[in-house]
Image (tube, rainbow, N blue to C red):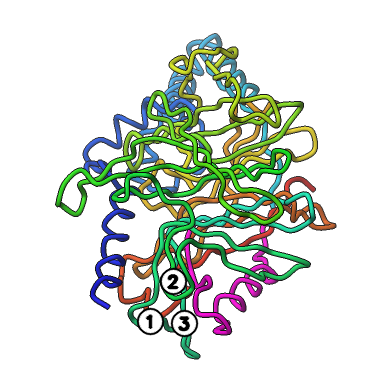
Amino acid sequence: MKETTASQSAFFEKFLMFLLGPSLQFCRTRATEECDNRSHANNDDVGRGAFLGIMLAGRISHRILNALARHWVQRSGFLVSLAWLVASSNALAQAPAPAVTVTPDTVFQAMFESYGNDNTLLDDWTGSDGALSVVLPDGRVVWDFSDTFLGFVNSDGSRPPGQPFINNSMIVQDNGALVQTLHGGTAQSPTSLIIPVDQSAWYWVGDMTVEGDRLRVFVMEFIRTGPGPFDFQWVGNAIASFVLPDLTLDTVVPTHGENNVMYGAALLEESGYTYIYGTEDVSGTEKYLHIARATSGDVFGAWEFYTGTDWSSDPESSARLLRGVGNGFGVAKVGNRFALFTMDSLVAFSSELVMYSSNNPEGPFANRKHVYSTPESSRNRFTYDAHVHPEFTDEQGRLLVSYDVNTFDLSKLLSNVDSYRPRFIRVKIGR
């Protein structure tokens, strides 16, 4: 019992530091950081965090031009024309984002609730974060998760003390139902499904892809650096391979992580390539998108890294492409365009899920669009890490998108299992 309680406490120590990190200095540094964020400078949603939004450089420049134009309208038609020309040029550069319609998804929400509350087995999933998915060749779907609770759920929706807690897991979905939780160890003493060689380290999971008879799972490794609650750091990335169809773990092989990029936050198969999206996590509110790619079916082969203008074999040339992505996000092809869904990391613990779009899988991702304000972000709860599940797009063309929910109040993890379970929404892009 004491060991389980300590593991739960350690989880939250790790988790909060991972999310927040140096953003404890957020209020002191935010204004200057925003002035550098050109990709976010033309955001029309100025009301979002009023004391921050007024610092947006693009917004300020437009206001200055408009003020000058009004002041000099009687004295210089040229100034009016200049202000109009600059504003129009910026508007043309940022083409209007398509309309977005969002509705909560009750089917997947009910499926996970039913599975998580079922006490038929006492070593299966009852709550987690992560929720990435991939379709297997035989039609089954694998969901992978990071920190995971297993065990028993009371009839009132509470979780008894002492339930197993592990760092990663999978759920197998078959014929529309969640049927099996995969973890390491035994049913009586479960462990994480994927464990580093260093027993003091742990893996959190990223996205997945299928290559022949192997399921490839991107994982990120963390270690402790001292006895303190926040003494830990990310140390690298790896790719775990599972043999199909049995889903038995085969190998875990280190992979690229140059420039401190956590590759595997999202994957996309497109035009003969596996696009590998990653996050460079500088601080809680300073995170950058990086993109690499490998030939489809060969993530262990040579990678190319996007420089912002071209592809290079040099991993050090990978460029910071977009500021504001989460540690987890999703990319999907919608029609002939590409959509990137993420919780807005420009604001600590933001409730805003946003979308960027591009004509190409490597970007540039622009046209920032508000998608959804997560209603769970209140009363000591917060949301993070959006993921898209294009394999579950419905007949109306609505994408399935998930996001994680967690709580600052550790007692809620036991009193209410819904405080630590993903949520699902349907997103329709366009008319």
**Disc 3 and disc 1 in contact, CB within 8 angstroms:** no
Residue 419 is labelled as: 2
**Disc 2 and disc 1 in contact, CB within 8 angstroms:** yes
Residue at the left extreme of this rendering: 227
Q: Is residue 131 above or below residue 69?
A: below
Quadrant of the image occupied by residue 362? top right
Q: Is residue 104 above or below residue 96?
A: below
**Disc 2 and disc 3 in contact, CB within 8 angstroms:** no
Q: Is residue 333 above or below residue 371?
A: above
State the residue in front, 151 or 359: 151
Tag 1's secondary structure?
Answer: helix
Task: Please state if 378 lies on the left or on the right of 113 as rendered.
Answer: left
State the residue in front, 342 or 215: 215
Task: Please state if 356 lies on the left or on the right of 21 as rendered.
Answer: right
Going from the N terminus, do you reach mark 2 or mark 3 first?
A: 3
* Residue assigned mark 3: 152
Going from the N terminus, do you reach mark 3 or mark 1 first?
A: 3
Q: Quadrant of the N terminus?
A: bottom left
- Where does the magenta region start and end? 102-129
Q: Picture coordinates of residue 299 (x, y %)?
A: 61, 30
Residue shown at the point (59%, 14%) measured from the top left: 311
Does the segment drawn in magenta span residue 318? no
The residue type indicated by label 3 comes to Phe
* Residue assigned mark 1: 415
Sort mark 3 into few (<14), some (14-19) or many (20+) by Cα contacts within 10 Å.
many
State the residue in front, 278 or 337: 278
The residue type indicated by label 2 comes to Ser
Q: Can residue 243 be seen by looking at this rendering?
A: yes
The residue type indicated by label 1 comes to Ser
Tag 3's secondary structure?
Answer: loop
Q: Picture coordinates of residue 153 (x, y %)?
A: 47, 83
